[in-house]
């Protein structure tokens, strides 16, 4: 079973939930899909080894063949190629690697070249199987790295995807294909606002979901009231607890020090299995 | 000399738009006669690469100088390749900007003045809606 952990707002506790959940259940894989700023490893302390390079295709123009007709530039929806009266400029960071420019070029002047945009790493040892993607600094295309990362899913295990925040492409790439999605939120105006955006995404993708309210004793009751009206299950509430916060600040997953939470995360898995 | 000024509307008394890729209008002025042509920027709402698209749009207009507020690296690369001199830091109306330039009060820039994606604002094409607990970043 594949379970994604997402949220509209950043900093609600996705990684906290993902790491503690993974450490509480058996036969599990954890994937850090926040490839722009992966941080699960900070709480796990595993040694990591590189598994693969992630490449995307980038156009290279042969200027001796090009007649500067501008078809490629007109075709490109991402403005990754500019054609001037006597020059062509390619902007690799904007290219999505769709291949359209190669197809529309009447002079066969464009070829594709591989360009590395990131890597996949895996934990060596450790009690859970951990993978993460790392997007190279300066690159904007997180989705190809996330998709490559998720190819390491072992269907016989419970796979947990720690998604990036927001509702943009990297989030969609992270939650797509999941059997279930946990949305972590806090009951504050921002938390609630961004939760609604994330819910829209999951409804469109038709992924079943439930909510975890983190720091449940701050803010107000707007999230719970909403979940009640919409019949969305509130799977767990994590209090704004000094001990949990302190462990977090020290990079220690709280289930390792407060064992009763391990039981709660096992119950969380049972609730999800019952819902789908 | 043909000078292009980024503007918030298509006239000589329009205010200079400080953004290049996402400005409202390009006002292309003949600095001797002050005759002008207004071109609506095709890339105001481009999901990404607005600077690239905008630079390409004006590169074919036979312009000698571009006057704007600031410029990013991708657009700068295209304008340089097209032999267009880029002048930044302009303010006031389009007519004022041309006057300032003619008097030598505005200097040509030798490189981009902004990082990529600077003019995208909230929720831009590649934006990811970050808003981490400790303040947002991109």
Image (cartoon, rainbow, N blue to C red):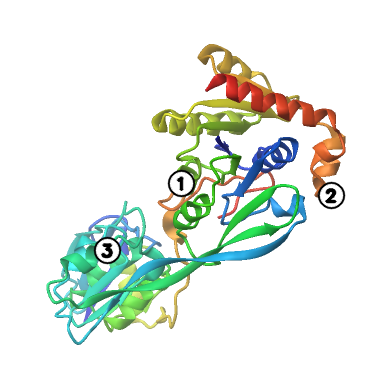
Judged from this view, the residue extending furthest toward the front is A156
Name of the residue lying farthest toward the bottom: A64
Q: Distance between the residues labelled 2 and 3?
A: 47 Å
Q: In which quarter of the image is residue A133?
A: bottom right
Quadrant of the snapshot with the C terminus of chain B: bottom right
Q: Pointer 3: residues within 10 angstroms few (<14), some, or many (20+)?
A: some
Estimate the x, y position of residue B116 in percent, counting from the top left: 45, 66
Q: Is residue A132 left or right of residue B64?
A: right
Which numbered disc, 1 or 3, marks the residue that appears first in the sequence? Answer: 3
Mark drawn on residue B2:
none
* Above or below, comparing residue B134 to residue A93 in the picture: above
Are the residues under marks 2 and 1 on the same chain? yes
Residue A264 sits above or below residue B29 on the image: above
Front-lying residue, A123 or A35 = A123
> What residue is shown with label 2?
A250
**Residue closer to the observer: A161 or B62:** A161
Q: Name the residue under label 3.
A: A99
Residue, disc 1: A173
Q: Are marks 1 and 3 on the same chain?
A: yes
Classify mark 1: helix, strand or loop.
helix
Q: With A260 as the anchor, is B87 left or right in this view? A: left
Determine the secondary structure under disc 3: loop
Mark 2 lies on a secondary structure that is loop
How crowded is the residue under tag 1: few (<14 C-alpha within 10 Å), some, or many (20+)?
some
Q: Is residue B3 visible?
A: yes
The spot of residue A228 in percent (x, y) is 58, 13
């Amino acid at each position: 079973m594949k379970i994604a952990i997402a949220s509209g707002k950043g900093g609600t506790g996705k990684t906290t939930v993902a790491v503690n959940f993974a450490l509480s259940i058996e036969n599990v894989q954890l994937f850090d899909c926040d490839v722009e700023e992966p941080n699960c490893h900070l709480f796990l302390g595993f040694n990591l080894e590189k598994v693969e390079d992630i490449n995307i295709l980038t156009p290279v123009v042969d200027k001796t063949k090009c007649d500067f007709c501008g078809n490629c530039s007109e075709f490109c929806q991402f403005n990754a190629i500019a054609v001037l009266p006597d020059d062509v400029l390619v902007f690799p960071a904007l290219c999505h690697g769709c291949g359209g420019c190669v197809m529309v070029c009447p002079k066969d002047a464009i070829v594709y070249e591989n360009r590395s945009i990131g890597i996949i790493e895996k934990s060596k040892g450790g009690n859970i199987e951990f993978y993460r993607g790392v997007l190279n600094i300066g690159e904007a295309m997180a989705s190809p790295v996330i998709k490559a990362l998720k190819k390491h899913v072992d269907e016989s295990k419970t796979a947990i995807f720690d998604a990036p925040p927001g509702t943009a492409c990297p989030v969609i790439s992270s939650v797509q294909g999941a059997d279930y999605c946990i949305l972590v939120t806090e009951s504050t105006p921002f938390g609630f606002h961004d939760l609604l955006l994330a819910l829209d995404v999951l409804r469109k993708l038709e992924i079943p979901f439930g909510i975890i309210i983190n720091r449940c004793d701050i803010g107000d009751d707007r999230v719970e009231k909403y979940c009640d009206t919409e019949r969305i299950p509130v799977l767990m509430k994590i209090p704004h607890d000094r001990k949990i916060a302190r462990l977090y600040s020290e990079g220690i997953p709280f289930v390792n020090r407060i064992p009763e939470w391990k039981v709660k995360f096992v119950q969380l898995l049972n609730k999800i299995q019952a819902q789908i | 000399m043909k000078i292009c000024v980024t503007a918030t509307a298509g006239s000589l008394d329009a205010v200079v738009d400080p953004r290049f890729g996402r400005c409202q209008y390009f006002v292309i002025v003949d600095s001797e006669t002050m005759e002008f042509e207004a071109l609506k920027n095709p890339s105001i709402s481009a999901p990404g690469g607005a600077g690239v698209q905008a630079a390409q749009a004006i590169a074919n207009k036979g312009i000698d100088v571009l006057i704007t507020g600031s410029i990013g690296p991708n657009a700068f690369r295209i304008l340089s390749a097209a032999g267009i001199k880029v002048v930044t830091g302009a303010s006031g109306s389009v007519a004022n900007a041309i006057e300032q330039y003619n008097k030598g009060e505005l200097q040509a820039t030798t490189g981009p003045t902004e990082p990529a994606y600077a003019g995208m604002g909230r929720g831009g094409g590649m934006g990811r809606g970050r808003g981490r607990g400790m303040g947002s970043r991109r």
